[in-house]
Amino acid sequence: MFNSSLKKTIFDLNSTLESLKERINNLEDENNRIHAILNSMVEGVIAVDKDTRVLSLNPTAESIFNIAPNNALGRIFLEVFPNNDIAEVIAQVLKKGEFISKELALIWPVQKVFQVNASPIFESKVVNGCLLVIHDISEIRRLETMRRDFVANVSHELKTPLTSIKGFVETLLEGGMEDKENSINFLRIINNHADRLNTLINDLLDLSHIESKEMVLKKEEFLLADLVDEVLSGFESQARKKGVEIKSNLPEGLEILADKGKIEQVFNNLIHNAVNYNKENGFVNIYSEQLIDKIKITIEDSGSGIPVKDIPRIFERFYRVDKARSRELGGTGLGLSIVKHIIELHSGSVGVESTEGSGSRFWFIIPYKTLLTFYLPLKQI
Ligand code: ADP
């Protein structure tokens, strides 16, 4: 009798042990799954207890706040994350037990914008901690600002010539046509503004086409020096009027594989600027230099140069050193950003070195792999 009851107890203990083992295994699996999810999340996740001690955090949270791995656990939130705004959000959640979602700007360790979602952690219906999910929305905000600025810029650029056109047309309609000499003058001005609108719209269309994902480069082999000579012939009269001498020193046999029409546009825009922003009787020099696996092409001018503070922004859309001068010269402020986009589509890069008052050297580099052959010995290139 005793024996059989002992056997039953042992049997019961064994099955309890088995079910415990199974539960522990299940819990371990669950734990591993949660860890895997937390580790792969692009959002930073931080859990703190009711005293704001860090209970857990994932690698994204560590990298956002530049914290060494495992350095935060058990420490008070503010000790590890010196951010009063987030600490305030946690304090509110712990106090009210309600979910809070807030957009916060972080200045340190990096300048970023975050969407912080904070939820209370309940234990037996009492708030016992707070779970933060931190989403980096800096890129979204940056793109939104860019889009807003772009729309404002385009509207402004379109409005300026349109206002003038409307003003002169109204003057003509209100009797200005009787004065023949003046009306011809007005029509010339209207024509110039219409040309400006046309150039602006063409540049905008070019830019939107180049930026669109569907844009495919039509690559072909061509001789670079020949293309530049063709482009230069279009600048003869403009350069002559200003007494600017343009020289191309590109090697004869330099053949490249690229989108000819697009590279022509690059030269057009850069040479146009080099002549436009040049001084009377200045020069423009075009030359190339072979780098290890790339070719560098430079358009050097003896013009006004660019102030140091403007250089980092010069390739941005609509950025101009002297707006009035650019407009007067028929500029749209889009030429250099078109150049940058085209060269980047060719996996290349662009840049400028400039000294205010004495000239600029705009350059672009195309990777060597897009080049087919060099017929000239290296030292001559
Ligand atoms: P824009 O149509 O105004 O010329 P770009 O995008 O081609 O527009 O150039 C942007 C600005 O960069 C110009 O307004 C001018 O201030 C400056 N810039 C460009 N090229 C030169 C140059 N070669 N020399 C001096 N300034 C230049």
Image: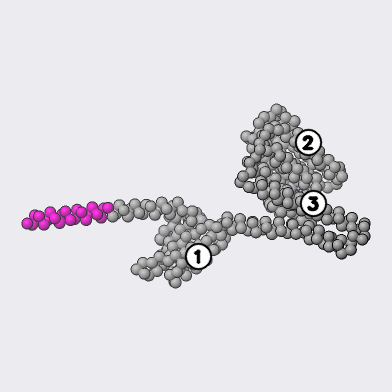
Secondary structure at numbered mark 3: helix
**N-terminal label among 2 and 1:** 1
Residue 8 lies in the magenta stretch: yes
**Between residues 18 and 108, which one lies in front from this camera angle?**
18
Mark 1 sits on what residue?
101
Amino acid of disc 3:
Asp
Within-10-Å neighbours for mark 3: few <14, some 14–19, many 20+: some
**Between residues 376 and 68, which one lies in front from this camera angle?**
376
Image quarter where the N terminus lies is: bottom left
Labelled pair 3, 1 in contact (Cβ < 8 Å): no
Q: Residue furthest bottom?
A: 96
Q: Residue at x 72, y 42 (%)?
A: 266
**Looking at the rendered structure, which numbered label has been put on residue 229?**
2
Labelled pair 2, 1 in contact (Cβ < 8 Å): no
**N-terminal label among 3 and 1:** 1
Q: Position of residue 153 (x, y in %)?
A: 70, 57
Q: Give the alpha-carbon distance from disc 3 to disc 2, as whole Å.
A: 26 Å
The colour scheme is one colour
Highlighted magenta segment, given as a residue range: 1-22
Within-10-Å neighbours for mark 2: few <14, some 14–19, many 20+: few
**Between residues 341 and 84, which one lies in front from this camera angle?**
341
Q: Position of residue 23 (x, y in %)?
A: 28, 55
Q: Give the alpha-carbon distance from disc 3 to disc 1, as whole Å.
A: 50 Å
* Label 1, ligand 1: CB separation under 8 Å: no
